[in-house]
Image (tube, coloured by chain):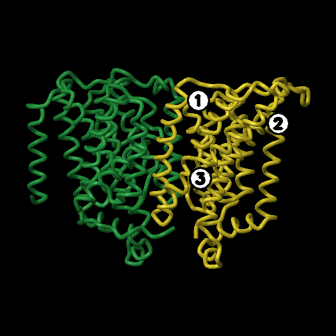
Amino acid sequence: MSPRSWLAFVVVALAVAPLVLPSFFLQLLTEIAIVGLFATAFNLLMGFGGMVSFGHAAYFALGAYTAALLVKRVGVPLLAALPAAPLVAAAGALLFGFFIVRLSHTYFAMLSLAFAQIVFTVIFKWKALTGGDDGLLDVWPPSLLKSPAAYYYFTLIIVGLCILALHAIVDSPFGYALKAVRENPRRARYIGIDVRRHQLAAFVISGAFSGVAGGLFAFYNGSVFPDFAYFTKSFEPLVVALLGGVQSFFGPLAGAFGFKILEWMISRQWPVYWPLFLGAIVVVVIVVLPSGFVGLVGGRRWRRRPAAKA
Amino acid sequence: MSGLSVGMLLFLVSVGMSLIFGVTRIVNLAHGAFYMVGAYLMVTLVEFLPDRPWAFWLALLLAPVGVAVLGGVIEVGLLRLIYRRDPLMQLILTFGLILVIGTLVLLVWGPDNKSVPRPEALAGSVKIFGQPFPSYYVLVLVLAPLVAVALWLLFYRTRWGMLVRAATVDREMLGALGVNVAALYTQVFVFGSWLAGFGGALAAPTVAVALGMDGDVLTTAFVVVVIGGLGSFAGSFIGALLVGLLQSFGILIFPAVSIVLLFALMAVVLIVRPWGLFGRPEA
């Protein structure tokens, strides 16, 4: 099958899913869509920009808390609160990214982690606003969207639009310039690309879409917690993108599907063992399958050269 | 004073992390997990050994050895396969190890917090400048600088130390000169793990031995090595003291923001001198 017919098949399958699947699986699919968006946004940086952030949970949490706080403390309806999530996340990404993109490789990862830990601590300690450790509870969507099927369609539409937007960005002149920066920053600079500005723009875009994922997740979950900004959360999009394959645009979406299904199957039977499996999977993928599971099937379009040695 | 002893414990952990990075160029995120395993081994050994005065000291000797063995297995079994790969993949791999080790610790020792009794001779407190101060912390304040001096002698006065320092500067040249670099990597990783285990074992009587202690120590040790400079021996020492003091004074003065202070300091260092106060710029 051609990629186009694959896509059509997936869209139709997702559209009719509520007619055949029980609501539990709809919730699982909703979560997959949200994680898929988060990982795809993350992969704009990792796969296309060659920048690995270890603190993307910060922007996810900023989005989630923005949406939850607006609904909970200000009483704004969901449809008005959700667009604010990416705005705040993007503002955070702009502020932190301004410093982060000045560094490279390991130091880039470490500074992004440091900023994410600051966000986590602020959320954790600022009890009056964020509820601290107890989080914010009862953040449900309005009754129209409350049923699993309704929220599933809602999430699917938003995530679909975001994925289309991200795909357009990757395919735009900006996306190609970003890939040029990834492959050879010095050459990119010589041909007139402002390297830092492109990296910062990618960082902000990635942060904004992570914020959308965070906002959607807040209403899906019905509550938000400081864990959303913790460093273990930052590894979720990384592992998902890695599982799916970072060289292809749709890899992280496939990875989200595999990841969540696996998580569900394993934690259903042995809840305690899930981190063990996750860790083992990460180790195996890195040692044995460097291009992820999509790499097995052969997503050749965006194949990158092996990374330069340290 | 307690800030100093916290700083000393931190030094043991971070110098191992820094040493491993200096030679192998791997930021070992599982280092905090090694520290945790050291503390848990201490719990088991103190319980298992007969109730004699020497039992504590024997446990303090054996627990880090157990961690060193674990480090050796991981280095030979996994890390050796990926030295030539993207450094970020190595980072992610050691993150995977955190999850694996964390779950295994949960399965072996269970979810409840444990504690290690201080040895009888050091259970009381001494007066220093008129302030009561737990005697065990005095032990920490004596032992850790001793280790620091021993490390200095090891790095600057022995052939092995010279090789380690050479490896942090130019590994390929060292290999070209006929040194078995692969063996050196293993030795350094084992030694760094031993230091983490020793830090954990020594810290065990001062803290609640609990799941999650790995994450706390990892983030702080991480701040230490970033501030001091990855791969720098003096940097770990100064950085650990700075962070230890900042933490204990921060808690007294601004309890809510002491951690923010820590990470803000780290962010400032990374922005101004990304390679740390005592480190070398990236080649």
The three-letter amino acid code for the residue at tag 3 is Gly
Q: Position of residue A205 (x, y in %)?
A: 34, 52
User: Going from the N terminus, do you reach mark 2 or mark 3 first?
Assistant: 3
Label 3–label 1 contact, CB within 8 A = no
- Circle 2 residue: B139
Question: What residue appears at the point 39 percent right and 33 percent down from the top-left corner?
Answer: A65
Relative to residue B83, is residue A132 depicted above or below?
above
Residue A49 shows in the view: yes
Chain letter, yellow in picture: B
The quarter holding residue B112 reads top right
In the rendered structure, find residue B72 and report the number of the disc placed on it: 3
Dot 2 falls on which chain? Answer: B
Query: Which secondary structure lies at badge 2?
Result: helix
Label 2–label 3 contact, CB within 8 A = no
In the rendered structure, find residue A120 and report the number of the disc placed on it: none
Dot 3 falls on which chain? Answer: B
User: How far apart are labels 2 and 3 at the CA level?
Assistant: 29 Å
- Circle 1 residue: B210
The quarter holding residue A72 reads top left
Relative to residue A87, is residue B188 depicted above or below?
below
User: How far apart are labels 3 and 1 at the CA level?
Assistant: 24 Å
Query: Which secondary structure lies at badge 3?
Result: helix
